[in-house]
Image (cartoon, rainbow, N blue to C red):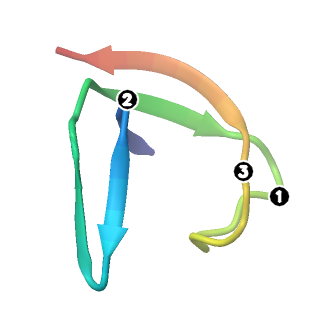
């Protein structure tokens, strides 16, 4: 999965703002579900430059 790595972010209503430091590809660990309220873990396997 591709993930945006930020140093800071904020949300106001439906607007999300922040900075994009890197885009990384993560291999998720088992048990991950696509739910923003569910914490997940994984391993970074690549960085997109």
Q: Which residue is mark 2?
A: 7
Q: CA distance from mark 1 to mark 2?
A: 26 Å
**Above or below, 26 relative to 46:** below
- Farthest left residue in view: 49
Q: Quadrant of the N terminus?
A: top left
* Of labels 2 and 3, the one closer to you: 2
Q: Which residue is mark 1?
A: 31
* Of labels 1 and 2, the one closer to you: 2
Q: Earlier in the sequence, mark 2 or mark 3?
A: 2
Q: Which residue is mark 3?
A: 40
- Farthest bottom residue in view: 13
Q: Nearer the viewer, residue 25 or 21?
A: 21
Q: Given contact means CB atoms under 8 Å apart, are the residues at marks 1 and 3 in contact?
A: yes
Q: CA distance from mark 1 to mark 3?
A: 8 Å
Asked which secondary structure carries label 1, the reply is loop
In screen coordinates, is 44 left or right of 38? Answer: left
Give the percent coordinates (x, y) of residue 13. 30, 85
Asked which secondary structure carries label 2, the reply is loop
Q: CA distance from mark 2 to mark 3?
A: 19 Å
**Above or below, 35 relative to 5:** below
């Amino acid at each position: 999965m591709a993930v945006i790595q930020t140093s800071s972010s904020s949300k106001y209503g439906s607007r999300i703002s922040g900075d994009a430091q890197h885009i990384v590809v993560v291999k998720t660990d088992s048990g991950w579900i696509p739910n923003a309220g569910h914490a997940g873990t994984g391993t970074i396997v690549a960085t997109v430059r």
